[in-house]
Each structure stands twice: as structure tokens, then as C-alpha cells.
Amino acid sequence: MAHSKPARFLDLAALFFWVVLSSIRVCAQSPGQALRDAGVEARVEALVKQMTLEEKVGQVIQRDAGGSLTGPGRGGSGWDSMAARGEFGSLFNLTNPPWINAVQRAAVERSRLRIPVLFGLDVIHGFRTTFPVPLGMAATWDPSLVERAARVAAEEASATGIRWTFSPMVDIARDARWGRIVEGAGEDPYLGAAMARAYVVGYEGARLDASDSIAACAKHYVGYGAAEGGRDYNTVDMSERTLRQVYLPPFKAAVDAGAATLMSAFNSLNEVPTSANAFTLTRVLRDEWKFRGFVVSDYDAINELIQHGIANDARTAARKAFLAGVDMDMEDGLYGNLVELVRSGAVPEATMDEAVRRILRVKYALGLFDRPYVQEAPRSAGIKAEHRELARQAAEESFVLLKNDPARNGAPALPISEGARTIALVGPLADSARDMLGSWSTSASRPEDVVTLRAALTARCRERHLNLLYAPGTTVSGQSESGFREAVNVARQADVVLMALGEEGTMSGEANSRTRLDLPGNQEQLLTAVAGAGKPVVVVLFSGRPLALTSTLPHMSALLEVWFPGIEAGPAIVRTLFGDAAPSGRLTVSFPRTVGQEPLYYNALNTGRPAEGLDLTHPPRNAAERYHSRYIDELNAPLFPFGYGLSYTRFAYSPVTLSATRVSARTLNSQNGASLRVSAEVKNTGNRAGEEVVQLYIRERGTSVARPVRELKGFKRVALGPGESRRVEFTLGRDELAFWNIDMQNAVEPAAVTVWIGPSSAEGPQAQFEITE
Ligand code: BGC
């Protein structure tokens, strides 16, 4: 029956107040809650009801603008005309506010239902302010700093109209050959989960609908980092238990923190491509985790289902990906097939509606319907001072001091002694601004924003009246030795030699797998030649992955791993070398002795024939030495273990104290917050201030499935002045002690538990406790 006029007026008034109220409610919500908001839901539902099939299909399509306003629309028209026709729901790689507004205006003012476009970009480690690469950010072991850096990235990106970043990459990576190890947090799921949370909270802020918040995208779902042989895009095969125990936790943490989107991956997982994997995309993500945002495919990943061999044509590829749970198609243009697929009944319209709901939900939660445009007024052109300051702090916290031997006067090579009057700076990375940005810098980041090591060192030497001699010596990948003589020459004249060695910024990242992990080109020969001058050699190592440094290490007095530090590379390195800042980063990836040890990770299983206690420095001499899980030509241990990093001071650990030595599995499983407290006193025994990353590890024995020899279950960064000590306490409860058992239940089991509190995965005092029935 038709409504009478007054009734319709009341309806409209109610709707009006409800919209106002619900938008106020959304404002007060965390990003995760915004995806569950009843008000948003009602608006989504009302809109979906009005949509034609073509309009729905438009929403599940994402296009790559490639930095240009000219789109591939019919008749050569631009993105704006396509937006007016509702031909895509999202566009990425457009960073110019007037262009973004032009496309948005077409969508909001000319399309039938006025649905705004969601603009995305790979904002990976900063937008204009480039921070250290993610592997470096993880080495800070400082989630609050990572969160602040992500916030800065969100503020800068959103100011150009970007409301969605394809970050964080939360893939666990245990193989240094894989180039994308640089984009994640390393090999550990506990640390990976902490970093995932920090990025999501930083990007999405307190309110997703704030104009300076951007939606996060946890990627690449899932298992991508386990590519066989470390070769990008390669096959991944693992047990469901390993998947759940190691590779899923950072994604789960991102979802629980409110991540609005996920990206499916390129790889197959147990023979099913992850962009058509209903088990991971629907059963785990939707049914178990109750994820309410949407999933976008990785670039061309749906089309690649044909190469994977599970579809013989585009239509089938689109159907399989969509039915498995990929809601939006990134650029491969196959979801256009969904109109016909739905019409023919091959894809239920209800599935289409659900995908559209998920996408619209995120758009509403972002406030895009209410505030679709970005402000075009000119903003200050430069980088804010506080953003630069944070970039420097992040870089300093990310540096890992791997070696610091005494130089000739008996004092450690670092910090550089007051007595050093002449400094030689050698190496191909000393003055390369572009490399400092690492892989995945945005179109907004600029080499001219970078202060290189050479520039910062020149300023410091001028200020302190020191002599600085500079000779690059070689290029990163070059073979020519023509620059060696000059390099050796400056080394001879110096009191200390700083060598900036490593990889180019773009030698890691996507499609950059390596089979060799040594220094590229002839840098090792340069190092050997320069070391021959007999002066202390401090290597500043730039890399996007662990390198195998066994043969080069003896030529170095000190080694500082600095990853790719971003715009404040130079000032951060100089302040660290001179002792204004003390290195406090710790490795989140194991550094191998040789590439043949890869994949290499600390949290491995013990095996039935562990080599523990054996002297592996020589080949086995008899059966007792041979039949162990070992190599005949190399140690098992990494060159530098997970969690490792020196400081300019020393820290001592007291014995570990437990609040109880027995705790029952039943109590822990009941989830009533039952826990055990574990602590140790950490003391700065040196004469300089420093920060220690105190790490807690456990090992469980006697369980239904084999558990790793050590697992990180807590960490805290503590600053201690000389002589100062502090008791550092952790709690172990269900979250820390449960695992996926023989029945594929996540539960705490009776076990004998060893717990360590120490400075890395290879050291620290231990204590034991028992988990009873
Ligand atoms: C990468 C993703 C990235 C996407 C969009 C792909 O090649 O694997 O990580 O987000 O491109 O640029």
C-alpha cells in the first residue's frame, strides 16, 4: 500500500535523524567496530537493493590508473567518464588531488547511485616521508614507533585523496633469497603479529572515517613468503598446522585490529592458488575470523589462475576467484565476466550482493559517502619537521650493530673515538640518495629529500674540524677495479675507514630473488683491498635481506646493518657512528653463514637427531658425529641469530623468576585470564646509556605435536642508564602457550616448559615450569 504524505514525511525525518545519529556513532568507534556498525549496515543494505547487476559488478572492479588521468574507457575516454558510468569501484596509482577529485566528481555527481570511488596506493614505508623499509622498521622491535610512522604515512597519503594503502605486508619470510623479505617483519609470527597490529592501528587511526585515516590491506594472503627455493611467485606447500601456527597469525592480528581489507596472493597453497582458495578466503577468514571487510586480488592474480592450471579461460578464472572469496579484481579486467556469470546462474546473485556489501561497508566506514573529496588548496610543499624527526628516530632504532671489535687502542671500533682526526669514506652506497629509499617508495617520495651518509658526514666533519676523504671504490654490482687504488689510498691516510657497502635499494622487493647472498659485484674484493691498509674498518651495510657475510666479516672491525633507512639515512647513521645515538635494533631474520643453510629460522623443530652439543666445526669423523641433522661442511647455527644485536654498553640478566612452577592446562584453557608471571632483572653494566630489547622465549616438550626449540612470546624495549637495572616482567597465558595440537584444536596441553629471558634467540638464562592436566 502506498504511503500517505505525512507518513512519508515522518519516514524521511526518522531516516534523517537515524543517519545523523549513526554517523555520530561511527565517529566514536574504532575501525574494527565501524565495520560492524548497524547504521552503516542499514545504509549498505538500502543501497545494494537499488543496484542493477551492472552497477554491482562495477563495484568489484579495480583499475590501475598508472599515474594518468586518461583511462582505457570506451572511445578513449578517461577515468572520469568510466566513473560516471560506474565501471569501477576503486582506482589506484593516482596521487594528484585535482585528478582524484575529477574522477570522484564524476562518480558522485554523474553516476546514477553516486557511489564514491575508493582511491588506493602502495604506501609501504611512508608516503612523502620515507621511513626505513619494513624489515628495518621491524628491527626496531618498537610497535608504538611503527604505529606512529604508519600514522604519518596515513596523514600524508590521505591529504592527496588516497584512502587505502596496500600495506602492511605481513608475510612471514624464512628465506633470505626471497626478495620480498624486505617488505615484511621477518621470520617470527609473534613479532609479525605485533607489527601487523601496529601498522593497521597507525593507518586506520582512532576513527576510520576521519579524513586523515586510510584503510589498511594485510597482504599477501597467504603463505606467499614460503615460496620454494625463495623464488618469487613459486609454489608453496605446507601443512595446515604450519599455516595456522606460523603464517596465519599476523593476518589474524591484522583482522582483529580492524584491518578493512586483505589482498590475496600470487602463490598456490597446497596446490590451490591463494586467489581462488576457498579454505583460506572463506572458511578461515570469514567463517572462523568473522572478517567483515573485503578481499582484493593481487595484480593480475585472477588471470594467473589460467597459468596455474585451474582455469582454461578468463570466465572460469573469474568465477573460481569470486566464488572462493576474492571480492575485488585488481586490474586484470576479468570481473567484467560476472555480469554474464550471474545471469547464467553460474554465480549466485547472493554471492555478488555479499561482495558488494563488503566493499560498500568499507566505503561507508571510511566516510567516503559523506566526504568524498580531497581538499585541493595548496599545502606546504615540504616535509614537516616532526615527520623528518620521526624518520630519523625510526632509522636509528632500526640499526643493528652486528660486530664491534676492539680497534688497536683496545676500545671498540664504535662509536668513533674522539682521537680520530681523519675519516675515510669508501663504498658505492655512501652517496646514493635513491638507494636510501629502498624498494616501494611512492611517487611522492623524492631522492632530493634524502640526506645521504656522505652529506651528513661532511657536515659533521666540518663542525668538528675533522678531515674527510671520500672514494666510492666501485659500484654496487660492478666488476671494475679501477677505483680500488684511490680507495686504498684514502684508507691509508685515515684513522678510521667507513665503508658503505651492500645491495642496491631495488635488489630486494618483488621479483628480486637471489641465489647468492654475498655482497654484489666486487665489493668483497674492495673490502679486502681496503682492509689491507691496516686501519679499523667500520662497515655500514645497506640491504633488504640478510646477507651471508662469513668471508667478509674478518675484514671488519665493526658492522652496522642499516637496511635502507629512508630520508634521514645520513643523519641517523652519523649520529650512531659518533655515539649521539646508540644502536638498539635487533634482527628479526637469521643471517646465514652460507646461502646453502636457507631457509633458516630460529623457531625450528628439534628433529629426532639434533646436533646439539656436537662440534660442527669439522666434518664428522665417525658415525657418532655423522648421523645427526647437520651439514658436513658448515655449522647449523646462523652467523647472527634472530633477536641479535649489540649496543654500545653491556646488559646482564639475572636468573629467571616464575610466579609458579606448576599451572594447569585446564585453567589456562578456560580463558579466564589465568597466567603465569615470568621476570628477570636486566642491568646495564657498562658506562653508557643504552636500550635493550628484552626477549622472552619458550619451549614446550611432551606435547601431542612437536614444538619449536624456541618461540618468541614476549618482548620489551627498556632504556637503562649506566649501572641502572630493572625487573622486566612478562605474563604467559593461553595466548602464549596454546598451539594447534594433534586434533587441530588451538589449546594449551600438558607440557614441560622451558622459558628464557634474554638478549636474543640464542642466549639468556632459563627456568622450567610444568603445565599439568
Ligand atoms: C604486488 C602487491 C602490490 C600490487 C599493487 C603487486 O605486484 O604483489 O604487493 O600491492 O602489485 O601495486
Image (tube, grey):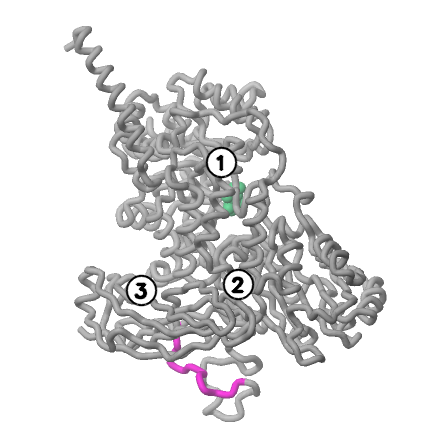
How far, Cα to Cα, is label 3 from label 2?
24 Å
Task: Give the quarter of the figure containing the C terminus.
Answer: bottom left
Judging by the rendered image, the residue that carries numbered circle 2 is 585
Q: Residue 21 occupies which quadrant of the picture?
A: top left
Tell me where the magenta segment starts and ends, as one range: 605-616
Q: Residue 569 occupies which quadrant of the picture?
A: bottom right
Please rate how many residues cluster around mark 1, counting C-alpha atoms within 10 Å: few if below 14, some from 14 to 19, many from 20: many
User: In the displayed image of the protein, which residue is found farthest to the bottom?
Assistant: 622
Task: Give the quarter of the figure containing the N terminus.
Answer: top left
Is 350 displayed left or right of 763 in the figure? Answer: left
Q: Nearer the viewer, residue 511 or 431?
A: 431
Mark 1 vs ligand 1: CB below 8 Å: no
How far, Cα to Cα, is label 3 from label 1?
35 Å
Sequence order check, earlier mark of 3 and 1: 1
CB contact under 8 Å: marks 3 and 2: no
Residue 585 appears in the rendering? yes
Q: Position of residue 554 (x, y in %)?
A: 67, 77
Q: Select label 3 or label 1 by which is in front.
A: 3
Judging by the rendered image, the residue that carries numbered circle 3 is 736
Judging by the rendered image, the residue that carries numbered circle 1 is 120
Who's the residue at 23% across and 15% down the image? 13
Is 717 inside the magenta-drawn segment?
no
Who's the residue at 73% across and 54% down the image? 459
Q: Secondary structure at mark 3?
A: helix
Q: Amino acid at mark 1?
A: Gly
Q: Amino acid at mark 3?
A: Glu
